[in-house]
Image (cartoon, rainbow, N blue to C red):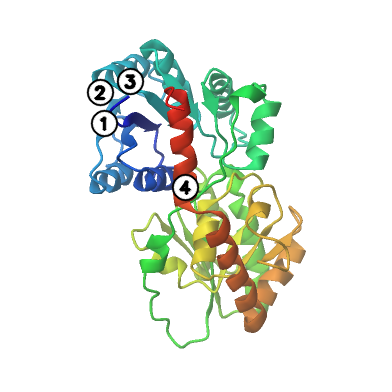
Amino acid sequence: MTRPIKVLQFICPTGFYGAERWVLALAKHLDPQKVDCELAVTMEPGQKKLELVSEYNKLGLASHIVPMQNKFDLSAVSKLAALIKANNIDIIHTHGYKSDIIGVLAARKAGIKSVVTPHGFENAKDIKLRVFIWLGCQAMKYGTKVVPLSQQLLSDVLRMGVNKNKTLYIQNGVDLSEVEATIAPVRPQDGEKRIGFVGQMISRKNIVDILDVFESLHQKHPNTRLLLLGDGDSRQELESYSQNLKSKNNIEFLGFRDDRLALLKSFDLFVMTSTLEGIPRCLMEATAASIPVAAYNIAGIDQLISHQETGLLATLGDKETLLTYWEALLFDTEHATKLAAAAKDYVYQHYSANRMAAEYTELFSELVGLD
């Protein structure tokens, strides 16, 4: 092959969160002399302008819209297959349940290879979503290669029945230069402690536990504030729940913000209470911003944070212990600074986007027969 390998990144965006930013980071770090990386996204009626597309185009890379009449419009398969053929795509790279279903079917229809990258699995309660997730997991089995972001996700896909010979582990990598370039805002000298979360407001993020722990913290330490950045299906329910808390006037739901990283750098503590994760990008960004971290000790988070070495981790569901860890990191500045510095060093050493892009280039080359 004398031209670069043409890879189509395909995702059905829900905003501009971890998976979308991951796609952008990979595309940014691939060598354009070796890989021509285009983007395709679905667009449903009434859907807002996609920031991923805008940011992708800033890289000088091509993007395509696949229109859908509704969330389950299977005509998208034929539309995507036609796009693949018209643009001489060699490999499609999918991200997310819906993307996996549509992308793998379109790849088979167009006669090209497919790479599926699971970013995490949702322990949803909604029966329709559970069925959809199951279908996405079934589609994954028919991909040419399944490349999870973490060892836990690799174990998950094997348990779901994906052939081991189809799997490859490429450790997650992120572009943290954006974090470095962001200037931290000037904080008022009022002594207020700011606890923050950034991410999707969906069931597996278990944000209600953050609210509960903050309620307990605020009763003991009134000069505290909770900032929640992000949006999602659970936001309305969480906002309603917070209105019944005594600390409600010190809780802010800020939604999706363009100044997300500046706000992140204003936190005194970054918190997570997820029940299920891949390797959360928001957590990497928090460590890159030198913000101390307290979270539940679950798979994925434990690949970034080691208890008492790079942060503090409580057993899943142990809100009392988590509260003590919040207090320790908020009010023992020396210890918090030491843990945050170690976490930053760890992420920069082990999660390079350049290294990840090089390993994906090797995989793409192998799939088109260049190795």
Q: Give the label on residue 80, or none.
A: 3
Q: Nearer the viewer, mark 2 or mark 1?
A: 2
Say which element carries label 3.
helix
Q: Give the label on residue 83, or none.
A: none
| Mark 1–mark 4 CB contact (< 8 Å) | no
Going from the N terminus, do you reach mark 3 or mark 2 first?
3
Q: Nearer the viewer, residue 270 or 89?
A: 89
| Mark 2–mark 1 CB contact (< 8 Å) | yes
Q: Amino acid at mark 1?
A: His
Say which element carries label 2.
loop
Mark 2 neighbour class, 10 Å CA radius: few under 14, some 14 to 19, many 20 or more: few
Q: Amino acid at mark 3?
A: Leu
Q: Give the label on residue 87, or none.
A: 2
Q: Quadrant of residue 120?
A: top right
Residue 43 visible, this orientation? no
The CA distance from mark 3 to mark 4 is: 23 Å
Q: Amino acid at mark 2?
A: Asn
The image position of residue 198, as x and y in percent, is 49, 57
Going from the N terminus, do you reach mark 4 or mark 2 first?
4
Mark 1 neighbour class, 10 Å CA radius: few under 14, some 14 to 19, many 20 or more: some
The image position of residue 252, as x and y in percent, is 47, 64
Name the residue beneath numbered marker 1: 64
Q: 335 above or below 290? A: below
Say which element carries label 1.
strand
The CA distance from mark 2 to mark 1 is: 10 Å
Going from the N terminus, do you reach mark 1 or mark 3 first?
1
Q: Nearer the viewer, residue 43 or 103?
A: 103
Name the residue beneath numbered marker 4: 18
Going from the N terminus, do you reach mark 1 or mark 4 first?
4
Residue 173 visible, this orientation? yes
Residue shown at the point (41%, 44%) measured from the top left: 26
